Amino acid sequence: MSCLSTSPATAAATPSPAPAPALPARLVLMLATAAGLAVASLYYSQPMLGIMGPDLHTSGTAVGAIPTLTQLGYALGILLLAPLGDRFDRRRIILAKSAALAAALLLAGLAPGIGMVLAASLAIGLSATMAQDIVPAAAALAPDAQRGKVVGTVMTGLLLGILLSRVVSGFIAAHFGWRAMLIAAAGSIAAMALVAQRSLPRFAPTAVMPYRALLGSLLTLWRRHGDLRRAALAQALLSVGFSAFWSTLAVMLHGAPFHLGSEAAGAFGLAGAAGALGAPIAGRIADHRGPQAVTRLGAALAALSFAAMLLAPWLSPQAQLGLLVAAAVGFDLGVQVTLVAHQTIVYGIDPGARSRLNAVLFVCMFAGMAAGAALGSLALAHAGWTGVAALATATSLAALAVRMLPSGNGGR
């Protein structure tokens, strides 16, 4: 009798699992800031190349190799170093890369000649991949119900780092010199490393395989997960149009009918930054309505924005500039919210392989960036700005078509 009477009470008293606590806002802010400062290191040099050449007594061709080596180092770092986040404690990796990045920036700022600057540029690219360790770290720390929001916030920091780095470096270099910019950048990374050392928890490794097997597993993940292939392909296609626009914008603005300088092209980065601020909103929508819908919305917005630029030949020069600004906000928002949604999808495939999944996604994304820069230049040379807009529209529509395909069973 006693057992019969207490059994329902016992069942009623059984507590339901408590929701995972939200990440502290200051930790999310630290991760976003660290990601932005890391990736900004890739772009500081671009507005300063004109004054670096005479100061280093070298040719424009040699100075032009600085951003090339920086981007090459970053691409190699994503492929060869980012997967290590699954094999070792991400906290140690982030702190080690912070130290290496600060040292490389300082070396570049103090370099007596172009040779040392070029070597430091490659090292900057390799170590700046700490940004690609921070984003999976944020995804691992975030509760499932808030992962999209947290990843979106951290990605906003990263994207603002990309878009605002040129504005900051151009201003500081003009007033204090290019060496002061690089030395200040080294100091900012060192300061952030001290904050990260106190704030970041340790991460338990999720893979025990040797390094060669770790790299080989990238291909295995690609073959196994259809959701990964769709995310990587769609983001690569969007990146083609994104890169085609930004790599040809300065040339287009320099010619008729605008005749504007590089400062005007740099100011367009502020329009892109406005679009990047939509990343946290995309993360929240992905948390509540699912990331698949966000990817389609983002790709459609990018395609519509690029297509609108096809109207430019029928407008006055002033109206064309207004259209370009509005389109830049629109397509940048579309590309960035799609990236956040893709990361939400990819990080949910296999929690034990987040660093490797992230590496696959970003290798494909940067391949699209490289292809976009090359194809954009060809399109501009043969068909003018209309050709660039048509290329970007077509690749964005292709990305939307990829996102409209049904998901595989279990992501396979």
Image (cartoon, helix red, strand yellow):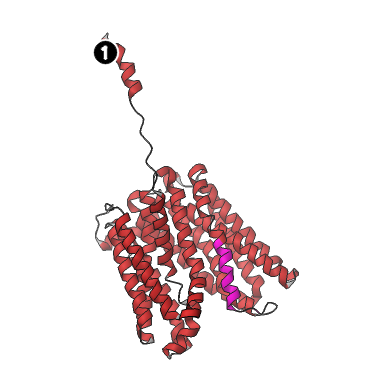
Residue at (39% x, 57% y) in the render: 30
x then y, percent, for residue 390: 64, 67
Q: Is residue 279 visible?
A: yes
Other residues around mark 1 within 10 Å, as few (<14) / some (14–19) / many (≥20):
few
What residue would you read off at disc 1? Answer: 3
Q: Secondary structure at mark 1?
A: helix
Residue situated in front as seen by the camera: 110 or 64: 110
Instruction: Give the amino acid at mark 1.
Output: Cys
Question: How many numbered circles are shown?
Answer: 1
x then y, percent, for residue 14: 33, 25
Verify whether residue 265 appears in magenta: yes
x then y, percent, for residue 56: 42, 88
x then y, percent, for residue 190: 34, 67
Residue at (24% x, 55% y) in the render: 208
Position of 342 with respect to 10 (left or right) is: right
In magenta, the rendered stretch is 258-273
Residue at (29% x, 65% y) in the render: 96
Verify whether residue 111 appears in magenta: no
Task: Say above or below: 134 vs 12.
Answer: below
Question: Residue 254's image quarter?
Answer: bottom right
State whether the magenta stretch is mostly helix, strand or loop. helix
Q: Is residue 226 visible?
A: no
Residue situated in front as seen by the camera: 292 or 61: 61
Task: Say above or below: 392 vs 121.
Answer: above
Q: Quadrant of the N terminus?
A: top left
